[in-house]
Image (tube, helix red, strand yellow):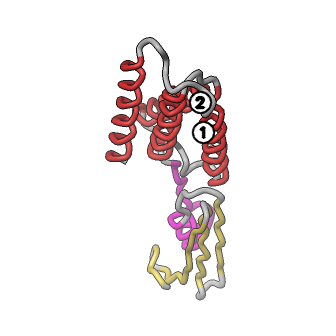
Amino acid sequence: MTIQVSGRTLTFHNGNTGGYRSMLALDRETGQAVLVLNSSTRSVDDSALQLASAASAAELQPTALPGLHLGQIAAFFIGLVLLVSGVVALLRTRHRIAAVRGAIHTVAALVLLRVHGPWALLPAELWSALVGLVLASVLVGLLHSKASPAGPERHRRASIASVGFAVLMLVALVWTA
């Protein structure tokens, strides 16, 4: 494909796969070529086109990383707390209702972290590792709880209501994602 940038005709090809981004930009008139590789999902197109169209280093403009807002930071930390509490509940469960609630909390935390996490700035392997660890803890927790009683003798309704609340929270997170 070709594009006009700063009065120069550039030929380029870009792509992404598995959390990686790349772009090759060529200025055929000057014989300049730029190849930008990135190990995150953050786009490199603007940077590559700017580099390829610049006649000198003085023409280059700094590109800023996307900023994080206070709401994103808060949601990220809430997601981490929810994730840790869910995993702890799964691994230290005393009954199956608590295990189900812990599993729902960990899935809700993954949704919250995926939507509000800084994954565009981090390698994709980090997200994959996090999902793998969470799924392993959910599996271990649910298998461990199989030998446990269904629920607590006292406050059984409150335990079931807490699972219902966790399901509503998960539905709300998925709905707004």
SS at badge 2: helix
Q: Amino acid at mark 2?
A: Leu
| Vertical side of 173 occupied by 55: above or below | below
| Vertical side of 115 occupied by 70: above or below | above
CB within 8 Å, label 2 to label 1: yes
For disc 1, the neighbor class at 10 Å (few under 14, some 14 to 19, many from 20) is many
Residue 126 at x, y = what percent?
65, 48
Confirm whether the magenta stretch covers residue 154.
no
Residue 156 at x, y = what percent?
41, 19
Residue at the image position 65 percent from the left and 47 percent from the top: 132
Q: Residue furthest top?
A: 154
Q: Which mark is residue 138?
A: 1
Res 134 quadrant in image = top right
| Vertical side of 10 occupied by 98: above or below | above
Res 145 quadrant in image = top right
From the image, tell me which residue sits under label 2. Answer: 90
For disc 2, the neighbor class at 10 Å (few under 14, some 14 to 19, many from 20) is many
Magenta stretch, residue numbers? 45-65
